Image (cartoon, grey):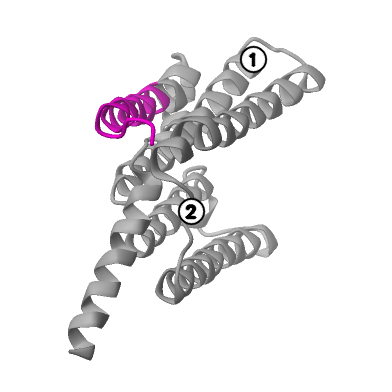
């Protein structure tokens, strides 16, 4: 009987976690981060000064956070109520944060190693693709861990969209085409589209309480 109760509790916790991402608002928020990168890159290509570009970039990120907060408060909570995680959910959250932090630290350590290695560097280490590849790898690992431990499977696809940014930026700059659109704009539209689809589904399935 205790095993059945434990299984039921785990299933409830799993559904609770999934419900936190069912409204698509996190997808929309993450798409705004890509939009911020796209706009920043566009301004950079247009030779706009950093004193203008950076505040615009920051403002778009803050707008994304504001939309996430407002959406949760005035759209999601009136339809689902407030979610309070139990011991299993709290443990999962701490594991996710811990493993994601480890991934970020390892990626940072790789960056530091690249910077401190003395010249002349080996050909593979001197490649301009190295740092973008490390950034992409760190993003993939971080998003994959978050997707696995948060049971938020769409994060895998979102992570790929984020990871494509730096390598595509490098390649598009070499080809002389609009890096802002290819590297960040199209991935932003993909993630935004995913979020809007989930958001519409959520509104249809969850009328206000």
Q: What residue is at 43 percent from the left and 27 percent from the top? A: 183
184 up-or-down from 8: above or below: above
Q: What residue is at 40 percent from the left and 21 percent from the top? A: 182
From the top left corner, tell me how far across and down residue 28 is, in percent.
Answer: 44, 31
Marks 2,1: beta carbons within 8 A: no
81 up-or-down from 165: above or below: below
Apparent side of residue 109 relative to residue 143 in the rendered image (left or right) = right
Quadrant for residue 154, please give it. Answer: top left
- Quadrant for the C terminus, please: top left
From the top left corner, tell me how far across and down residue 198 is, in percent.
Answer: 30, 32
SS at mark 2?
helix
Nearer to the camera, 96 or 71: 71
**Magenta-drawn segment:** 186-209
Residue sitting farthest toward the right: 51
SS at mark 1?
helix
Which mark lies nearer to you, 2 or 1? 1
Q: CA distance from mark 2 to mark 1?
A: 25 Å
Nearer to the camera, 31 or 128: 31
8 up-or-down from 136: above or below: below
From the top left corner, tell me how far across and down residue 187 is, in percent.
Answer: 38, 28
Nearer to the camera, 125 or 179: 179
51 up-or-down from 78: above or below: above
Apparent side of residue 3 relative to residue 55 in the rendered image (left or right) = left
Residue annotated with mark 1: 43
Residue annotated with mark 2: 134
Q: Is residue 37 magenta?
A: no
From the top left corner, tell me how far across and down residue 1 is, in percent.
Answer: 17, 89
Residue sitting farthest toward the front: 209
């Amino acid at each position: 009987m205790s095993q059945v109760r434990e299984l039921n509790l785990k299933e409830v916790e799993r559904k609770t976690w999934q419900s936190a991402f069912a409204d698509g608002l996190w997808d929309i928020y993450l798409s705004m981060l890509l939009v911020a990168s796209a706009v920043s890159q566009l301004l950079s290509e247009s030779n706009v000064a950093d004193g203008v570009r950076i505040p615009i970039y920051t403002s778009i990120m803050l707008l994304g956070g504001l939309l996430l907060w407002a959406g949760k408060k005035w759209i999601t909570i009136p339809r689902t109520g407030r979610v309070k995680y139990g011991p299993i959910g709290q443990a999962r959250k701490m594991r996710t944060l811990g493993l994601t932090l480890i991934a970020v630290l390892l990626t940072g350590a790789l960056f530091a190693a690249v910077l401190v290695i003395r010249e002349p560097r080996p050909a593979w280490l001197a490649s301009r693709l190295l740092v973008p590849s490390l950034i992409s790898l760190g993003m993939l690992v971080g998003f994959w861990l978050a997707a696995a431990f948060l049971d938020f499977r769409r994060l895998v696809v979102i992570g790929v969209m984020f990871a494509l940014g730096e390598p595509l930026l490098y390649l598009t700059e070499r080809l002389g085409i609009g890096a802002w659109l290819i590297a960040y704009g199209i991935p932003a539209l993909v993630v935004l589209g995913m979020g809007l689809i989930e958001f519409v589904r959520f509104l249809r399935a969850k009328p206000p309480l």
